[in-house]
Amino acid sequence: MRSLDPVLLAWSASHHGTISSDAFRAAGYSLEQVKRLVSDHMIERLLDGTYRFTGAPPDEWARCVAACQRPGQLVLAGPTAGRWWGFRRMGSDLTVHVIAPPASHPSVEPWISAYRTAAIAPADIIDVGGGLRVTSVPRTVVDLSRFLSVLDLRSVIDQAIAEKGTTPAEIMRVVEPLLTPRRRWARTVGELVAQRPAGGTPESHWEGVVIRELLQRSVPVEAQFSTVLPGFGRVRFDGAVPAVRWAVEIDGHGEHFTSDGAARDAERDAAAAADGWLVTRVATPSLMADQATAISRVVSAYRRRAADHLPMRDRVARATHLSSEELE
């Protein structure tokens, strides 16, 4: 049996451990030689026309390369594209999700799930190299509306804007051609983009949850509020109500729970207090254990702060159930 050609090995290394029939032919391998490699368990078939080395570690992207090598120009989409772009809340469903042309039959393999449509712009098909074609970030966000809860979809929209370089306008550019009565999922994306909070974009899933829960409870919070603390420097609160100089911080990163991290947080909060701010902190473990209670505590902290900022006349009115006018 001939040894494997170095060019063929290099091609496989750049294509997630796969080798295509075309690559074998280009390297001078006959069909019988490829069959022999299969029978010797050196390679295994993924899909017709694509193989992988049996010694290579399992790789989701090897199957994705195989799908993209299929006739019909399949494009990785939905949760598969979401995992490629590094979106949170994706999980692993052991399925390769693709967009395929209408009325096509890309494969009978149970691990391929095809959404058949012609409604995809060329600009939303990205060749990322290594034999992979993936939907663009904004198209991936829109397609994920068919798979995610509203809560998780909001989180992905925030991440796409905060981390992936897209904009609300780019997401709406994808949404608008898809707004048909049968595509309620596309309309949902548009509604969520329109409902984004004032200020910056929440930078984590739990920041987005807290900010939106506060807004639903009539707390006029702004996300990612930036200010300068005298003697300390510029800071950015996860959320803030500047009118009453109240801020909320959502502690999720592990460094918040180290002694050094806690000391930095305490120093920052002290600088905020010296400038007239009150910072309320909520840890993500508390949110995960009992979200309703954790949010209620934050809301109560804001309301106490807001009450403290009422003019004295209004405070007395509230305490005695009299209106400000009646006290004049």
Image: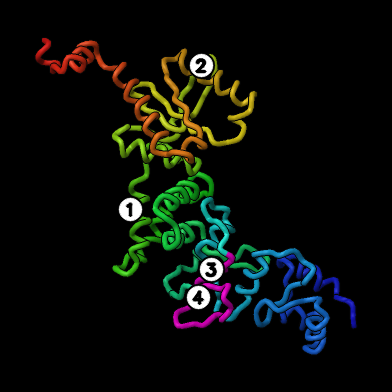
> Closer to the camera: disc 4 or disc 3?
3
Residue 100: which numbered mark, if any?
A: 4
Which residue is found at the position 51% from the left and 26% from the top?
Answer: 235
The amino acid beneath tag 1 is Glu
Measured as percent of width and height from the top left, residue 129 is found at 65, 64
The Cα atoms of the two marked residues, 1 and 4, are separated by 27 Å
Tell me the residue at 70%/79% (across/down).
45
Q: What kind of residue is marked 3? A: His
Please, is residue 247 above or below residue 103 in the view? Answer: above
Disc ID at residue 271: 2
Q: Earlier in the sequence, mark 2 or mark 4?
A: 4
Q: Quadrant of residue 324?
A: top left
Above/below status of 63 relative to 307: below
Q: Residues within 10 Å of mark 2 (few under 14, many from 20)?
A: some
Q: Is residue 107 magenta?
A: yes
Query: Considering the numbered disc 2 on the image, is that residue within a helix, a strand or a loop?
Result: helix
Query: Magenta span covers which residues?
Result: 94-114
Q: Is residue 29 visible?
A: no
Residue at the spot x=30%, y=17% of the render? 309
Q: Is label 3 in a helix, a strand or a loop?
A: strand
Within-10-Å neighbours for mark 1: few <14, some 14–19, many 20+ = few
